[in-house]
Image (spheres, rainbow, N blue to C red):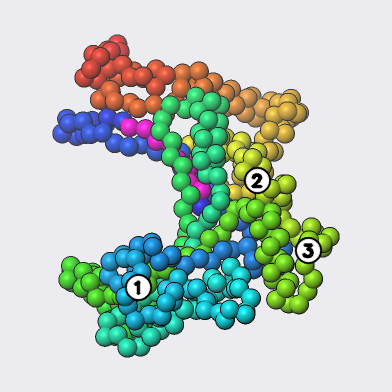
Amino acid sequence: MLHFQGHHLENKRQSDGKTKRERVTDFHIILNCTHHLTHGLLGDLRTIWPTLSTIPDDTKAHRGTLFRQRANRSTANPPDLESGAQQQPSTAAPPTPDEDRTHALKTWCHIFSSRAAHSALPCTFRLTRHVADWDTGLLSSRLTAMVRGGTNYRGRIDFEIKMENEGFVVYSDHWMNRLRLNRWVYWVCIVLQLWVLTWPLLWLCTARFEVVKVGWPYKLPRQEVVRRMEARRGRRGGRGGEGEEDREVLPAFSEAWCYASMSEEEFLASWGKMIVVEAVARRQGEVGREDMMRVMQAEREEREGRGRRGSGNTVVDTVVGVVAGIQGVSEQRDRALGWGGDDLGGGAGSLSVGGFTMGGNRLGRIRLG
């Protein structure tokens, strides 16, 4: 989910005469980008596109422990068991990267199952996923420049990509885990304030495994995509190389990159104008393709001219014209003077021009009438 938010600060006078600084949200646009991560993937690409990885030995992580730590070579685990390096005879062909990752996942699953079966403490195994190789810095800077340059917005802008349902947790069949997942026990702890004791106890007693991640790339190097397709075809006993049928199922690509659906520039061209329009309209909520079509329709009607949109009723056309004129004047004022700037004047009687406030406790008060 793409979150694009603009906000500013205001000093609001309370009923007791004191002034309280509050954050005011000007717009909060939410765009579901799931479609752009899967739309262009056909056939086997949906299988080979995600990248599974395990935590390296030299990286701190929960390896069935309370605190994050690196792999301990002095433990009873076989050599390279945690890193997933598959032991092969010297005459055997070296494993492919995909086989290494699969072996590492199976190894960690065996470790978790063995620990859960013999441990007196509850265990959890967490798999997380994330979006990789998406130039969010470019999206943030370009969208911010479009809103500021096109609408003269002077507030603060936040850009964030949030992953919903970013993972899942497997719980061992332990009585503490069963109580943890029981809805009635949960609400009893909330109502009776027992969570003050139960939650720290669970945190201290649980052996956590957080060693497996799945990355869903927004784009991949073209050679990497071809390599993965060749590896999958080789396991099926097919030929190697890139053929015409491969070109038909490959997603949108350039000479160097294959995209899941479209490049960052194409994404901005498709959604940028709609996001700017919704920001000016102070939109707060999720937007989608229907909003894009509505903006495109409004632009088409604007090009056709107001005269062609007459209803034939003089009164109705006059009212519509007046309302459109008022909206146009408001938009022109915002673009000329700026909007969304901090209002720290301290209450009624202050004057804000172009995002700069006159009035309040610092610059004096302007009396009206």
What amino acid is labelled 3 in the image?
Gly
Instruction: Report helix, strand or loop for mark 2.
Output: loop
The residue sitting at 33% across, 19% down in the picture is 357
Q: Is residue 250 magenta?
A: no
Nearest to the eye among marks 2 and 1: give it.
Answer: 1
Q: Quadrant of residue 293?
A: top right
The residue sitting at 67% across, 27% down in the picture is 317
Q: Is residue 6 magenta?
A: yes
Which of the two labelled residues, at mark 3 and mark 1, occupies the earlier sequence position? 1
- In percent of width and height, residue 69 lies at 31, 65
What amino acid is labelled 2 in the image?
Ser
- In percent of width and height, residue 301 lies at 71, 32
Give how far apart the Cα atoms at labels 3 and 1 are: 41 Å
The residue sitting at 35% across, 88% down in the picture is 117
- In percent of width and height, residue 366 lies at 28, 13
Q: Crowdedness of circle 1 by 10 Å Cα count: few (<14), some, many (20+)?
A: few
Q: Which residue is mark 2?
A: 263
Residue span colored magenta: 2-9
